Amino acid sequence: MLELISEHGCYGGVQRFYRHQSTATGLPMRFSVFLPAQASAAQVPALFYLAGLTCTEETFVIKAGAQRVAAELGMILIAPDTSPRGAGVPGETDNWDLGVAAGFYLDATAAPWNTHYRMYSYLLELYELVIREFPVQANRIGITGHSMGGHGALVMALRNPDRFRSVSAFAPICAPSQCPWGIKAFSAYLGSDQQSWRQYDASALMQQMKTPFPGGILIDQGLSDQFFPDQLLPQAFKASCLHAQQSLTLRRHAGYDHGYYFISTFIEDHLRFHHKNLQADRK
Ligand SMILES: N[C@@H](CCC(=O)N[C@@H](CSC=O)C(=O)NCC(=O)O)C(=O)O
């Protein structure tokens, strides 16, 4: 059962916010949907956007300025929240990089996180819900994201290429098993067996990838990004793409930092990249 929280006219379409009860997390979850005008008459392509640490389902919608081009292209935008809320895990709001707003888009297996912190399964649940409830072309769905959400987008696409036909990312955490944010989160959520971390590590997954994304992968990275040297490691993902013969466009931009000024500058390129890839004939 979907509860509409609010709706707002936007570029001829409508920006909506919803709440629903999730089976995966066992808690109420929130997400946002932009519906372009074209969606009132036909099924259209859709793009999931996964936000980063400290964000909500609202951050992308109010900061990235994506709706104008999505309205032009006739593309639905879906932005979920970044973690369960109200799980009651002791200390879950004590750190900005673990717990609330830091779900890392994985299914926790270690207590006390494993009951509700199940964002990987939640995204698959949301994917089905979106196809059921909105006028989406089910074979034309892409995914993108920023930082922790860029990690989530790459992992979701690499593990579910039949669901997500196109993938891009902004300053993603490319090798979480090797950076401080990822090591902290994976140790808490998944435990000490680093073999189990590989299923949520885009660079490790890409090493094993058998069928490349035909339209390539697009990543943008700011060179004034304060997290670039230690946390993001795009060079690791690039090396894995070379190994797997996956075409990767990794653009490095002088003068851009980690924030939404960077994302809002390049979001149009990402929407057009996905629109083009999703237009290509798909079975
Ligand atoms: N703790 C700091 C920094 C938090 C921060 O930079 N969050 C990024 C994502 S970082 C990786 O996932 C973000 O997108 N913030 C939202 C924004 O509007 O910029 C803090 O709380 O400021």
Image (cartoon, grey):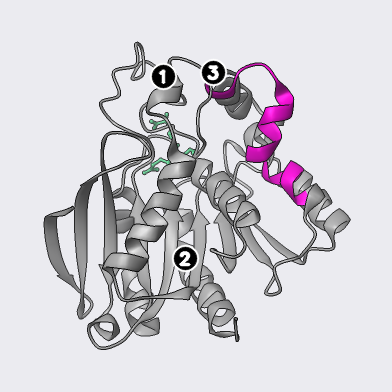
**Alpha-carbon neighbours of circle 1 within 10 Å: few (<14), some, or many (≥20)?**
few
Q: Nearer the viewer, mark 1 or mark 2?
A: 1
List the residue tagged with mark 2. Answer: 267
Mark 3 vs mark 2, CA separation in Å: 32 Å
Q: Nearer the viewer, residue 22 or 63?
A: 22
Nearest the eye: 81 or 271: 81
Q: Dot 2: what SS?
A: helix
* Amino acid type, mark 1: Asn
Q: Give the mark, 1 or 3, whose residue is nearer the N terminus.
A: 1
Give the residue at x 20% y 48%. Answer: 19
| Element type where label 3 sits in the image | helix
Q: Is residue 102 visible?
A: yes
Q: Split into 4 quadrants, where in the image is the C terminus?
A: bottom right
Q: How many marks?
A: 3
Mark-to-mark CA distance, 1 and 3: 12 Å
* Amino acid, disc 2: Ile
Q: Nearer the viewer, residue 94 or 167?
A: 167
**Where does the image place residue 31, in percent across and percent down from the top left?**
28, 51
In the figure, is residue 67 to the left or right of 184? left
Main secondary-structure element of the magenta-colored stretch: helix
- Dot placed on the residue nearer the N-terminal end, 3 or 2: 3
Query: Residue reaching furthest top?
Result: 90
Query: Magenta includes 82?
Result: no
Q: Specify few, some or many for label 3: CA neighbours under 10 Å numbering under 14, 14-19, or 20 or more.
A: some
- The amino acid beneath tag 3 is Ala
**Label 2: how many residues lie within 10 Å, few (<14), some (14-19) or many (20+)?**
many
Q: Residue at x 67, y 64 (%)?
A: 217
Report if residue 65 is visible in the image: no
Q: Which residues are magenta?
A: 189-206
